[in-house]
Image: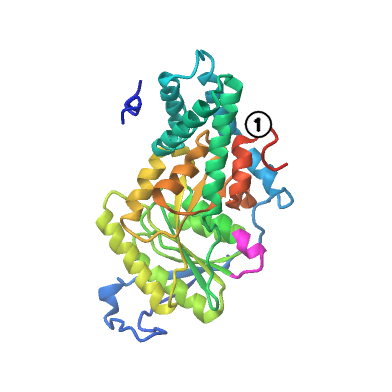
Amino acid sequence: MPWFRRKKKEPVEEPKTVEPNINQSNNNETVPTDTNSVFPEQNLTVEQPKEGVPPTAKVDEDDAEKYNRGLEKSRQSFGKRLTDLFVNFNGVDDDFYDDLEETLIEADVGFETALQISEEVREEVESSRASDPKVISQLIVDKLVALYTRNGRAEDNHLVFAKEGPSVFLFVGVNGVGKTTSIGKLAARFKARGRRVLLAACDTFRAGAIEQLQEWGKRDGVDVVAGKAQSDPAAVAFEAVKKAREEGYDLVLIDTAGRLQNKVNLMKELDKIKRVIEREIPHAPQETLLVLDSTTGQNALTQAKAFLETTDVTGIILTKLDGTAKGGIVLPIRNQLHLSVKYVGLGETVEDLSPFNPEQYVNGLFKDLISNRIGG
């Protein structure tokens, strides 16, 4: 058996150039007057959107169908694993429970959760003296459903907005997880719901990151504040929140760099961005959202733990659930990180980046394995 086996029962118009002015502040905090010591001289642009509309979205598709479609790969994969578990079933013994734990771990529900489910199944099988593979299989699913549902009720999945003035959401995550795309989709979503949105291109280091966010701004029809490549991200953040406060924007979405190679520098950079934001808008950012790629499975947890060491994260955006068989990753994220999943990516369109709904998530993950148990 693998290493994790448990011991047996022993155990836009042309952009206009604007100059950053960090001497302006709306609170009493002292701001350095030597701007060059804080922000190197640089040109910032405010990209005005060209006429256009956001990417087509299936706005009439209900949540249940969206989750069913988005979690199809995970549902089919888990169903196959469960079927394989019982192919050579010779009764319930310690070897069976070891195999059950291995099956659950391979489904990315997490090591601790696998042990918990195995122990709960063991206790119920022993108390009821169940021996029918179909009964035991259904019992495993029921225990997973109960655990996912129980944990889902205990968390707040809603985004926090400012009671007055602009709200600021800071997005963090390693390169390639879909961070900038998530910002673009959320911008379109909130604009369609009547909010005036401003984007800030503070990932000034990754090649193409600024242009990618500017392209989303054009597609969504929202403004983008951007600097030159390699410029100081905090200067861009400052100009964005200053513009939002002075011009009446409702929401600022800030992209950041995703370099984890040097956590000290990353921590300093994020801290600097946050200080600049709070000078202009007290109590902001209202959300610091960590974007994780669900296709990486347990590696997403490793990334998350590293970011939690560098900044205060308020919630998770889990992308690409429709492209993976590792949809069970939501549970270890909750159990190990103690963070709420706030949005999930269930497809390619804007509306497919959806607010996380624990009940529909459980439906989508176990729909074909439950005997008329959920949602009906």
The amino acid pointed to by label 1 is: Asp
Front-most of 58 and 316?
Answer: 316
The magenta region covers 188-196
Q: x, y (%) of residue 212?
A: 49, 54
Residue at image coords 38%, 80%: 21
Residue 68 placement, left or right of 273: right
- Does residue 12 sit above or below 113 in this rendering? below
- Does residue 215 sit above or below 120 in this rendering? below
Q: x, y (%) of residue 247?
A: 54, 79
Q: Mark 1: give few (<14), some (14-19) or many (20+) Cα within 10 Å.
A: some
The residue labelled by disc 1 is 368
Residue at image coords 44%, 34%: 114
- Does residue 310 sit above or below 121 in this rendering? below
Would residue 191 be counted in the magenta stretch? yes
Rendered image quadrant of residue 72: top right
Label 1: which secondary element: helix
Image quadrant containing the C terminus: top right
Residue 194 placement, left or right of 216: right
Rendered image quadrant of residue 7: top left
